[in-house]
């Protein structure tokens, strides 16, 4: 016999207040007012539970997802989150994804201060996103930062919102793996980094230093700019070096995520002494 | 006084047969029957004219695009293409892009045979796409192949169509910079490559060889698989090695375009002796 605490409430009405409240978290203004965001899909929710379980507020599961992933509801309850079963239709309304996977969580924001993010750098490296606007790009860079062992990511206030469901989705769980600051002006981020002795490297396709000559031995941060126009002159001027990924073919440039990937991989290789 | 040959016909009816014929090239079956495809935007059209000018059949320009890019119409006429002016509305109907840029060209297909593509490899490297389905991924990999000096790209028959407007658009002109074969089964591609002495390297996140230990000195080809499930076992078995990009953080994997980017960059670095 299950107690009432273990029996999940069952949501059937896609127009209920609760469902509408979840859906409203797709809007940045609501997320920022309520300090909550959405996490979708069993993999991302599991990573959230594993790395930031105390932040989970509510978990919504279809019957199918609940029976395929029995660990999720149990784990969420251990974290004092509320667990709700819901119909496929309700889940579909809640989900921002093209292919909803039966699982949506509402979580408290996970970002840290600029100071805390940069404290994590130690002898390693961080990634600064300045005016990066595409959710897929931001998410891909965060996923790469995680894969290549970056200590932290700092998302400037003029970049896309970390909590945009498309950003969270394209990090594939990596958003929960390393400290991320959001919302600070890039000037403030660079200022704090500079005072911490972190070398600021602007990723700039027309920069004077080739990636193969860049000094990646000490603590450093990759500063990545807008997809179309890169970094503004004053931000470039505030960096210690402007580093270009060498291009050997006829392509004029790499896209932001590719350039970032190559730079972060070089930082990882430098740390591993290859 | 301009002669009639220099005066462009002006298209005002978005429902005309000509406009519908251009629009129909968004469909793969029509492209393959007519051996024609669409190229959109002034930058991509300029690259098409520069690298495959003889393939241009028709060029459509709004008044604004024609006056901003006067070289395009002139260049297209030199290549014996027909040039048409059209209203913004007509161009918008023709364009597959979210932000049409006033320029659409119809071109004859540009792909080469598997043999011709692999003949270009010499001491360099090629990239094989096997069952890659996302247009943005395919386009990004082709852009990277160009930037990192790949000799050729070979797109298997079960991958997304090279001539899908989204693929062409995301190559940002790189589709015209290097020989690309399309449509052959991956087994045939690998077979021809093997007989040419080209080392076949499967990009595989769980492969036994780390990228830093991979032998990239001789002629080789990166074999890239599907976004979700990678390469099938028999294709893997037909490769000489399975190479993984080392991951140091908590991320489970890199996405296809990121892994390809790092691998191709390593090939470029090996050739440049860094």
Image (cartoon, coloured by chain):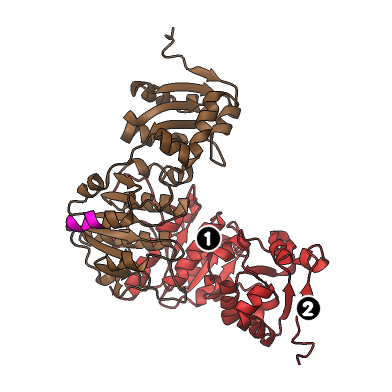
Chain colours: A brown, B red
Of the image marks 2 and 1, the number of the one nearer the N terminus: 2
Residue position for label 2: B9
Q: What is the total number of numbered labels drawn onto the structure image?
A: 2
Q: Main secondary structure of the magenta part?
A: helix
- Asked which quadrant contains residue A253, the reply is bottom left
- Magenta stretch contains residue B183: no
Q: Residue A90 location in percent, x, y?
A: 58, 28
Q: Position of residue B165 (x, y in %)?
A: 62, 63
The chain containing the residue under callout 1 comes to B
Q: Residue at x 70, y 70 (%)?
A: B36
Extent of the magenta region: A191-197
Dot 2 surroundings within 10 Å: few (below 14), some, or many (20 or more)?
Answer: some
Residue B207 visible within the image:
no
Local packing at callout 1 (Cα closer than 10 Å; few below 14, some 14-19, many 20+) is: many
Chain that bears disc 2: B
Judge left or right: residue A93 versus residue A267.
Answer: right
Asked which secondary structure carries label 1, the reply is helix
Residue located beneath label 1 in the image: B138
CA distance separating discs 2 and 1: 36 Å
Q: Can I make out residue B193 in this image?
A: yes
Secondary structure at badge 2 equals strand
Magenta highlight on residue A195: yes
């Amino acid at each position: 016999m299950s107690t009432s605490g273990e029996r999940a409430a069952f949501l059937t009405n896609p127009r209920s207040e609760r469902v509408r409240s979840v859906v409203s978290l797709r809007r940045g203004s609501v997320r920022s007012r309520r300090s909550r965001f959405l996490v979708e899909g069993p993999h991302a929710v599991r990573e959230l539970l594993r790395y930031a379980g105390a932040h989970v507020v509510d978990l919504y599961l279809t019957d199918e997802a609940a029976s395929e992933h029995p660990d999720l509801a149990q784990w969420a309850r251990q974290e004092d989150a509320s667990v709700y079963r819901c119909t496929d239709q309700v889940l579909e309304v809640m989900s921002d994804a093209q292919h909803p996977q039966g699982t949506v969580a509402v979580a408290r924001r996970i970002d840290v201060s600029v100071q805390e993010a940069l404290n994590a750098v130690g002898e390693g490296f961080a990634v600064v996103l300045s005016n990066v606007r595409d959710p897929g790009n931001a998410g891909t860079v965060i996923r790469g930062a995680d894969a290549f062992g970056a200590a932290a990511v700092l998302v400037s206030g003029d970049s896309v919102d970390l909590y945009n469901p498309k950003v969270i989705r394209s990090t594939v769980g990596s958003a929960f793996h390393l400290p991320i600051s959001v919302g600070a002006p890039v000037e403030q981020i660079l200022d704090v980094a500079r005072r911490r002795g972190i070398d600021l490297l602007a990723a700039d396709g027309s920069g004077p230093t080739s990636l193969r000559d860049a000094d990646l031995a000490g603590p450093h941060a990759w500063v990545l700019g807008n997809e179309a126009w890169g970094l503004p002159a004053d931000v470039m001027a505030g960096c210690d070096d402007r580093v270009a990924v060498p291009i050997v073919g006829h392509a004029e440039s790499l896209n932001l995520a590719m350039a970032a990937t190559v730079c972060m991989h070089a930082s990882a290789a430098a740390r591993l002494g290859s």
